[in-house]
Image: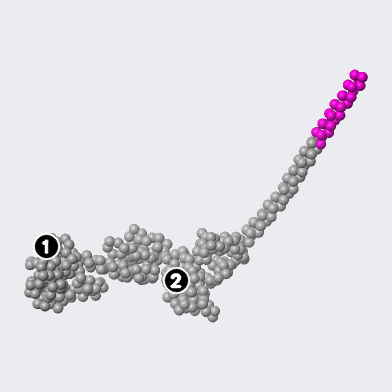
């Protein structure tokens, strides 16, 4: 046995407190390292009956080989005679297993080198597994971190045991990320790598808005008010559809809060991003009208509503057209994402003009058809007259031939 003292166990306990790696993992790693060093020292590739045993009370560790007690030894590596076994354990019998210490002399330096490599590797694996498990549990949730630095347009955020990466596409446009500032991010994904797991976070995800509403609005946390849908263009505008399961609770008013206190807190957290709170409805017409707020809507015509397409034509007053569409189409685009309906917006004057054009086209097509009918009738009448004229000419020729024949007969007589 090799005397290692109590310092190792104290180091294991300290490592467990600092990094959360269980003491048992370190002890097992040390034993595995001893077995690896023994096999390397003895030039053994495979040996299933070799193990290392650590005695915490005495602070000693040794390598042992397990052998089967037999009457006649055929394999010295796997078996031991009953007489030899009794020298180790007095009450042993044939068929029992005996552990024999095989720790080599002058094994300390070799074991230390092997132990260092194996333990270092096991500590990294254990730390990686802990971080992986921790952030797999956090995947899809909000967490708070500290901005470390900006590298190649990526923001590095420390969120605990590792640094997370916020790609450029997950950042809010125009936002300045200053190192040292605290930031609330959404854990988007966790990727396993050869070293520590790579955590991808987002500052532009729609779930951030949902989490903020759940934190600020007690009715949502209690399940009285339900968030049905969210559409967001980070840094500019967000639309959120809410529904109340209690008729006595106004879902929109609950989200706004007394004198707008709740919504102001959320807007401040999102750096003054505009938020439209929309009342959800099972009726698609009402839902589309609500989703296009703050613009007024004159009418909604459902063009298609099946499993393949959801399309609607919306008519708004002339002075509301630009508001309904939004800058660069933002309002109607967010309404489409929120409702799942493809929305085509027209103004009242555009619809009247289109209707007038349609009627004009219809009136122009109607006389054309009559004219074509008259032409066809004229052509038919002309064909009939030509045919009758031809028949008259044929009959006249026939009569002249008969008259000629009669005249010739009279002359002959």
Which element type, helix, strand or loop, lies under badge 1?
Answer: helix
Q: In the image as oriented, which residue stretches furthest toward the bottom?
A: 248
Q: Which residues lie in the magenta part?
A: 388-413
Task: Name the residue rendered at 51%, 77% in the picture.
Answer: 245
Mark 2 and 1 residues: CB-CB less than 8 Å, in contact? no
User: In the rendered view, does 89 fall on the left or right side of 155?
Assistant: left
Q: Who is closer to the viewer here, 107 or 350?
A: 107
Q: Name the residue under label 2.
A: 210
Mark 2 to mark 1 CA distance (whole Å): 62 Å
Which element type, helix, strand or loop, lies under badge 2?
Answer: helix
Task: Name the residue rendered at 17%, 75% in the picture.
Answer: 9
Image x and y of residue 94, in percent: 13, 73
Crowding near pointer 1: few (<14 within 10 Å), some, many (20+)? few
Magenta stretch, overall SS: helix
Image x and y of residue 257, in percent: 49, 77
Task: Name the residue rendered at 49%, 76% in the picture.
Answer: 225
Vertical side of 124 occupied by 383: above or below: above
Residue 348 is labelled as: none
Vertical side of 389 occupied by 311: above or below: below
Q: Name the residue under label 1.
A: 42
Residue 397 sits in which quadrant?
top right
User: In the rendered view, does 404 fall on the left or right side of 352?
Assistant: right
Q: Can residue 294 be seen in this view?
A: no
Nearer to us of marks 2 and 1 is 1
Image x and y of residue 243, in percent: 51, 74
Q: In which quarter of the image is the N terminus?
A: bottom left
């Amino acid at each position: 046995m090799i005397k290692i003292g109590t310092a190792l166990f104290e180091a294991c306990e300290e490592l467990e407190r600092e990094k959360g790696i269980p003491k048992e993992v370190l002890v097992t790693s040390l034993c595995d390292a001893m077995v690896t060093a023994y096999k390397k020292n003895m030039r053994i590739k495979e040996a299933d009956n070799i193990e290392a045993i650590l005695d915490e009370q005495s602070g000693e560790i040794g390598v042992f080989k397990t052998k089967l007690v037999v009457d006649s030894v055929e394999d010295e590596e796997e078996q031991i005679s009953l007489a030899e076994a009794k020298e180790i354990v007095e009450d042993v019998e044939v068929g029992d297993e005996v552990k024999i210490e095989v720790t080599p002399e002058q094994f300390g330096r070799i074991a230390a080198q092997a132990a260092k490599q194996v333990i270092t590797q096991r500590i990294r694996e254990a730390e990686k597994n802990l971080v992986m498990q921790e952030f797999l549990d956090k995947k899809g949730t909000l967490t708070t971190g500290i901005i470390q630095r900006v590298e190649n347009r990526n923001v590095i955020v420390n969120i605990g045991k590792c640094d997370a990466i916020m790609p450029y596409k997950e950042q809010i446009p125009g936002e300045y990320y200053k190192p040292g500032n605290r930031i609330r991010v959404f854990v988007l994904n966790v990727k396993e790598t050869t070293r520590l797991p790579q955590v991808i976070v987002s500052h532009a995800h729609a779930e951030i808005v949902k989490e903020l509403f759940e934190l600020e609005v007690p009715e949502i946390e209690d399940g009285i008010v339900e968030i049905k849908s969210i559409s967001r263009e980070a840094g500019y505008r967000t639309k959120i559809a809410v529904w109340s399961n209690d008729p006595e609770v106004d879902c929109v008013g609950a989200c706004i809060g007394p004198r707008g206190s709740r919504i102001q807190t959320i807007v401040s957290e999102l750096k003054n991003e505009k938020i439209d709170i929309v009342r959800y409805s099972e009726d698609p017409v009402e839902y589309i009208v609500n989703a296009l707020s703050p613009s007024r809507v004159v009418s909604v015509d459902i063009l298609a509503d099946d499993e393949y397409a959801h399309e609607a034509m919306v008519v708004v007053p002339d002075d509301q057209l630009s508001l309904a569409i939004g800058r660069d189409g933002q309002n109607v685009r967010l309404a489409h994402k929120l409702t799942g309906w493809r929305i085509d917006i027209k103004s009242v004057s555009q619809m009247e003009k289109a209707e007038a054009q349609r009627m004009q086209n219809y009136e122009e097509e109607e006389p054309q058809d009559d004219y074509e009918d008259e032409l066809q009738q004229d052509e038919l009448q002309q064909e009939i007259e030509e045919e009758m004229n031809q028949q008259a000419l044929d009959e006249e020729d026939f009569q002249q031939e008969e008259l000629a024949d009669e005249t010739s007969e009279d002359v002959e007589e």
